[in-house]
Amino acid sequence: MTPPGEPGGPRPGHPPGLPFRHPAVWLATAFGIGFLPLGPGTWASLATLPVAWLIGAAGGPAALVAAASIVFLVGCWAGGVFAAARGVKDPGAVVIDEVAGQLLTLAVAPPRLFPYVVGFLLFRFADIVKPWPASWADQRLAGGLGIMLDDAFAAIYAGAVLFVLLRFGLV
């Protein structure tokens, strides 16, 4: 292992035993967004909006669901590796779960500003409140699956509410 501070070695705030250049670090933290102070999950969700907009405009809801599924699977691996190296069940720097959840939430929305803002707010609310079964997954499951699954459940709740709001013309 390279000593901290040396090229290729872990940086302050990074898990011991996992070099900064390791793909799991970059993927789990959404290319470093997870290292931002004050609400890295919110920053990751916000950064996902333009990406979701491009995917949704180009491929529609199916493309967003596919992207969310791929990010979910990658997140199970990267989040699990990062958490194991750090020795923490769900490190705050792991924000790939927010990326997957935000993509899934927005699968029900047309790529327009107001529905995306409402989808962002609904997902952040559901991710923070963690209604069952999100709370169950957060408390009971470990590893990458545990990190990712609570946000997937939160996204399903947020997406369902957004769908209803859109259906009744409230958004």
Image (cartoon, rainbow, N blue to C red):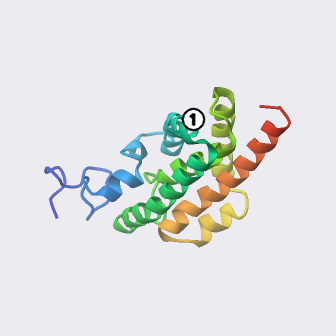
From this view, report whether residue 12 is shown above or below residue 79: above
- Using the image, determine if residue 103 lies above or below residue 47: below
Q: Which residue sits at x=27%, y=62%?
A: 18
All told, the count of numbered labels is: 1
Q: Quadrant of residue 19?
A: bottom left
Q: Is residue 132 left or right of residue 80?
A: right
Q: Position of residue 35 (x, y in %)?
A: 39, 45
Which residue is rendered at x = 32% and y = 51% of the image? 13
Name, please, the residue furthest toward the top: 113
| Kind of residue indicated by mark 1 | Ala
138 or 44, which lies in front? Answer: 44
Q: Position of residue 110 (x, y in %)?
A: 67, 35
Towards the viewer: 51 or 87: 51
Q: Quadrant of the C terminus?
A: top right
Position of 117 with respect to 72 (left or right) is right
Q: Nearer the viewer, residue 114 or 67?
A: 67
Left or right, 97 with reference to 20: right
Q: Which residue is mark 1?
A: 57
Residue farthest toward the right in the current orientation of the protein: 168
Q: Position of residue 138 (x, y in %)?
A: 60, 64
The quadrant of the picture occupied by the N terminus is: bottom left
Residue 101 horizontal/vertical position (percent): 58, 51
Q: Residue at x 15, y 58 (%)?
A: 3
Q: Residues within 10 Å of mark 1 (few under 14, many from 20)?
A: some
- Camera-side residue: 152 or 54? 54
| Quarter of the figure with residue 167 | top right
**Vertical order, 3 against 171 (above or below):** below
Task: Give the secondary structure at mark 1.
Answer: helix
Q: Residue at x 49, y 37 (%)?
A: 47
